[in-house]
């Protein structure tokens, strides 16, 4: 019964967005993506920071939740719906961090590119929930290796939306994976084995 109500709620939200004209084709009415910054809507401040780091000056990041907001029970406002509908890419953590919003992101992902960065991490690397079978701790940023894998998933999503700058996104994700944080650091020290 609960899953049925959840499906109805998700479908109602998406229908409302479509009727209100909030879901456009990605980039509709804007300059071509190669001539402007990629508009990315991210859920939490942690996810938004990852987008800024991997996207660099090529992204215009719009966050849904302010710092200190609990994403587990978050409910979208009308402004959130507009931001989501106007994004070139939607980025969320996944693994149920955003609660029921995950269903909304999956539904929107049918018309707007979307990625749940934590869901790209192999299950063997995740911490299983002792209370729930087949559920995992969504707080993957606490493990730098896992968060680097999330960065790689994000780089690939950005590369699909903005292929002209794919090399930049993948390079920034590589710097994260290899334990450095910027090209300047990478140039001043030799790369870690297997990174380049």
Image: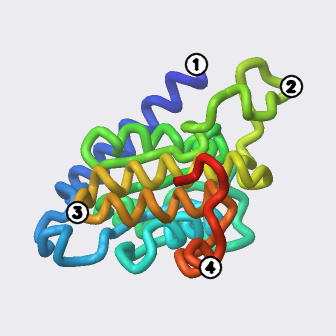
Residue displayed at 32% across by 48% down: 113
Q: Which residue is mark 3?
A: 164
Could you classify mark 2 by the number of other residues whose Cα lies within 10 Å: few (under 14), some (14-19), or many (20 or more)? few
Q: Find out whether the residues at labels 1 and 4 contact each other: C-beta distance under 8 Å.
A: no
Q: Which one is nearer the viewer's eye here, 19 or 130?
A: 130
In the image, which disc is placed on residue 131? 2
Q: Which one is nearer the viewer's eye here, 17 or 105?
A: 105
Residue displayed at 34% across by 65% down: 82
Q: CA distance from mark 2 to mark 4?
A: 46 Å
Q: CA distance from mark 2 to mark 3?
A: 45 Å
Q: Find out whether the residues at labels 2 and 4 contact each other: C-beta distance under 8 Å.
A: no
Name the mark nearer the viewer: 2 or 4.
4
Say which label, 3 or 1, has the lower sequence index.
1
**Residue 12: x %, y % from top left:** 37, 41
Q: CA distance from mark 1 to mark 4?
A: 58 Å
Q: Find out whether the residues at labels 4 and 3 contact each other: C-beta distance under 8 Å.
A: no
In the image, which disc is placed on residue 1? 1
Q: Which residue is mark 4?
A: 188
Name the mark nearer the viewer: 3 or 1.
3
**Residue 125: x %, y % from top left:** 73, 33
Q: Which one is nearer the viewer's eye here, 60 or 25?
A: 60
Say which label, 4 or 3, has the lower sequence index.
3
Q: Which one is nearer the viewer's eye here, 53 or 38?
A: 53
Q: CA distance from mark 2 to mark 1?
A: 21 Å
**Residue 186: x %, y % from top left:** 58, 72
Q: CA distance from mark 3 to mark 1?
A: 46 Å
């Amino acid at each position: 019964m609960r899953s049925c109500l959840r499906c109805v709620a998700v479908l109602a939200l998406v229908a409302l967005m479509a009727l209100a004209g909030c879901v456009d084709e990605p980039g509709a009415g804007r300059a071509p993506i190669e001539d402007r910054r990629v508009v990315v809507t991210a859920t939490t401040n942690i996810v938004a920071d990852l987008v800024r780091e991997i996207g660099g000056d090529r992204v215009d990041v719009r966050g849904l939740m302010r710092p200190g907001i609990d994403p587990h029970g978050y409910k979208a406002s009308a402004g959130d719906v507009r931001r989501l509908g106007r994004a070139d890419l939607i980025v969320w953590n996944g693994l149920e961090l955003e609660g029921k919003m995950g269903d909304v992101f999956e539904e929107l992902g049918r018309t707007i590119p979307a990625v749940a960065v934590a869901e790209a991490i192999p299950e063997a690397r995740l911490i299983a929930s002792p209370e729930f079978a087949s559920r995992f701790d969504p707080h993957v940023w606490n493990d730098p290796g896992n968060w680097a894998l999330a960065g790689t998933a994000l780089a690939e999503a950005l590369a699909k939306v903005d292929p002209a700058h794919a090399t930049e996104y993948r390079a920034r994700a590589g710097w994260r994976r290899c334990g450095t944080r910027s090209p300047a650091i990478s140039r001043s020290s030799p790369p870690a084995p297997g990174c380049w």
